[in-house]
Image (spheres, rainbow, N blue to C red):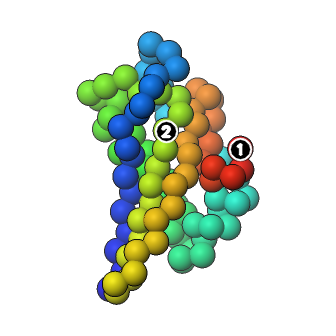
Amino acid sequence: MQEASITIPPQEEMSGIRSHYFSGNVVVTSNFARIFGEDGENNMFWVILETLTKIHKMVLTETVDYFQVGIYEHSYDSSVKSMKFWIIDDESVVTFLMPEDY
Protein backbone atom coordinates (compact mmCIF):
# COMPACT_ATOMS: atom_id res chain seq x y z
CA MET A 1 0.00 0.00 0.00
CA GLN A 2 1.31 3.45 -0.94
CA GLU A 3 0.95 6.50 1.27
CA ALA A 4 2.42 9.97 0.97
CA SER A 5 2.45 12.95 3.30
CA ILE A 6 3.72 16.51 3.40
CA THR A 7 5.05 18.15 6.57
CA ILE A 8 5.98 21.80 7.04
CA PRO A 9 8.32 21.95 10.08
CA PRO A 10 8.16 24.94 12.44
CA GLN A 11 10.20 27.94 11.32
CA GLU A 12 13.50 28.48 13.06
CA GLU A 13 13.74 32.19 12.30
CA MET A 14 11.85 34.93 10.51
CA SER A 15 13.30 37.24 7.88
CA GLY A 16 10.76 39.99 8.50
CA ILE A 17 7.79 40.97 10.60
CA ARG A 18 5.03 40.61 8.01
CA SER A 19 3.44 37.40 6.87
CA HIS A 20 3.75 36.00 3.37
CA TYR A 21 0.62 34.47 1.83
CA PHE A 22 2.04 32.19 -0.90
CA SER A 23 -0.71 33.23 -3.31
CA GLY A 24 1.28 34.14 -6.44
CA ASN A 25 1.71 32.12 -9.60
CA VAL A 26 3.40 28.77 -8.96
CA VAL A 27 6.57 27.76 -10.78
CA VAL A 28 8.76 24.72 -10.26
CA THR A 29 12.34 24.01 -11.18
CA SER A 30 12.97 21.30 -13.75
CA ASN A 31 14.69 19.26 -11.02
CA PHE A 32 11.62 19.49 -8.75
CA ALA A 33 9.40 18.41 -11.66
CA ARG A 34 11.73 15.53 -12.52
CA ILE A 35 11.92 14.23 -8.94
CA PHE A 36 8.23 14.48 -8.09
CA GLY A 37 7.15 13.28 -11.50
CA GLU A 38 8.78 9.89 -10.86
CA ASP A 39 6.05 8.64 -8.53
CA GLY A 40 3.22 9.18 -10.99
CA GLU A 41 2.06 11.75 -13.47
CA ASN A 42 -0.03 13.79 -11.03
CA ASN A 43 2.17 13.42 -7.96
CA MET A 44 3.90 16.81 -8.46
CA PHE A 45 0.54 18.57 -8.53
CA TRP A 46 -0.56 16.79 -5.35
CA VAL A 47 2.67 17.87 -3.60
CA ILE A 48 2.12 21.51 -4.64
CA LEU A 49 -1.56 21.56 -3.63
CA GLU A 50 -1.01 19.77 -0.32
CA THR A 51 1.91 22.06 0.56
CA LEU A 52 0.06 25.28 -0.27
CA THR A 53 -2.99 24.07 1.68
CA LYS A 54 -0.83 23.49 4.77
CA ILE A 55 0.88 26.88 4.41
CA HIS A 56 -2.44 28.68 3.95
CA LYS A 57 -3.72 27.08 7.17
CA MET A 58 -0.59 28.33 8.95
CA VAL A 59 -1.18 31.89 7.65
CA LEU A 60 -4.50 31.96 9.49
CA THR A 61 -2.87 31.61 12.91
CA GLU A 62 0.75 32.78 12.63
CA THR A 63 3.20 34.97 10.75
CA VAL A 64 4.68 32.97 7.88
CA ASP A 65 8.15 33.64 6.47
CA TYR A 66 8.79 33.90 2.73
CA PHE A 67 10.95 30.74 2.88
CA GLN A 68 9.45 27.42 3.93
CA VAL A 69 10.80 23.88 4.00
CA GLY A 70 8.57 21.00 3.02
CA ILE A 71 9.20 17.34 3.76
CA TYR A 72 7.68 14.75 1.46
CA GLU A 73 7.43 11.25 2.87
CA HIS A 74 6.35 8.37 0.71
CA SER A 75 5.90 4.89 2.13
CA TYR A 76 5.46 1.71 0.19
CA ASP A 77 5.15 -1.52 2.13
CA SER A 78 7.88 -1.23 4.78
CA SER A 79 10.17 1.31 3.06
CA VAL A 80 9.92 5.07 3.51
CA LYS A 81 11.42 7.69 1.20
CA SER A 82 11.82 11.19 2.62
CA MET A 83 12.83 14.31 0.67
CA LYS A 84 13.14 17.94 1.63
CA PHE A 85 12.10 20.66 -0.78
CA TRP A 86 11.90 24.42 -0.53
CA ILE A 87 9.08 26.87 -1.17
CA ILE A 88 9.90 30.55 -1.71
CA ASP A 89 7.28 33.32 -1.92
CA ASP A 90 8.43 36.52 -3.60
CA GLU A 91 4.83 37.83 -3.60
CA SER A 92 4.16 37.51 -7.33
CA VAL A 93 5.63 34.01 -7.75
CA VAL A 94 5.77 30.96 -5.48
CA THR A 95 8.72 28.76 -6.41
CA PHE A 96 9.03 25.07 -5.55
CA LEU A 97 12.59 23.79 -5.73
CA MET A 98 14.98 21.23 -4.37
CA PRO A 99 17.77 22.42 -2.02
CA GLU A 100 20.40 21.50 -4.61
CA ASP A 101 18.71 23.84 -7.12
CA TYR A 102 19.65 26.94 -5.14
Q: Which mark is residue 15?
A: none
Among all residues in the image, which is located at the extreme top?
Answer: 17
Instruction: Identify the residue shown where x is 61% and y is 28%.
Output: 90
Image quarter where the N terminus lies is bottom left
Q: Quadrant of residue 33?
A: bottom right
Image quarter where the C terminus lies is top right
Task: Find residue 87 and report its horizontal and vertical position in percent.
Answer: 55, 42
Q: Residues within 10 Å of mark 1 (few under 14, many from 20)?
A: few
Q: Nearer the viewer, residue 3 or 26?
A: 3
Which of the two discs, 2 and 1, labels the residue nearer the N terminus? 2
Q: Residues within 10 Å of mark 2 (few under 14, many from 20)?
A: some
Q: Is residue 72 left or right of residue 36?
A: left
Task: Find residue 64 and report its horizontal and vertical position in percent.
Answer: 41, 27
Amino acid of disc 1:
Tyr
**Callout 1: SS:** loop
Q: Quick check: can you spot residue 48?
A: yes
Instruction: Identify the residue shown where x is 63% and y is 35%.
Output: 93
Q: Quadrant of residue 44?
A: bottom right
Among all residues in the image, which is located at the extreme front?
Answer: 12
Q: Nearer the viewer, residue 80 or 3?
A: 80
Instruction: Identify the residue shown where x is 39% and y is 46%.
Output: 8
Q: Is residue 12 left or right of residue 102?
A: left
Inter-mark Cα distance, 2 to 1: 14 Å
Instruction: Identify the residue shown where x is 70% and y is 60%.
Output: 31
**Callout 2: SS:** strand
Q: Quick check: can you spot residue 49?
A: no
Q: Which residue is mark 2?
A: 68
Measured along the vertical axis of the image, is residue 86 above or below residue 74?
Answer: above
Q: Is residue 30 left or right of residue 40?
A: right
Task: Find residue 38 and report its horizontal and vertical position in percent.
Answer: 60, 75
Q: Which mark is residue 102?
A: 1
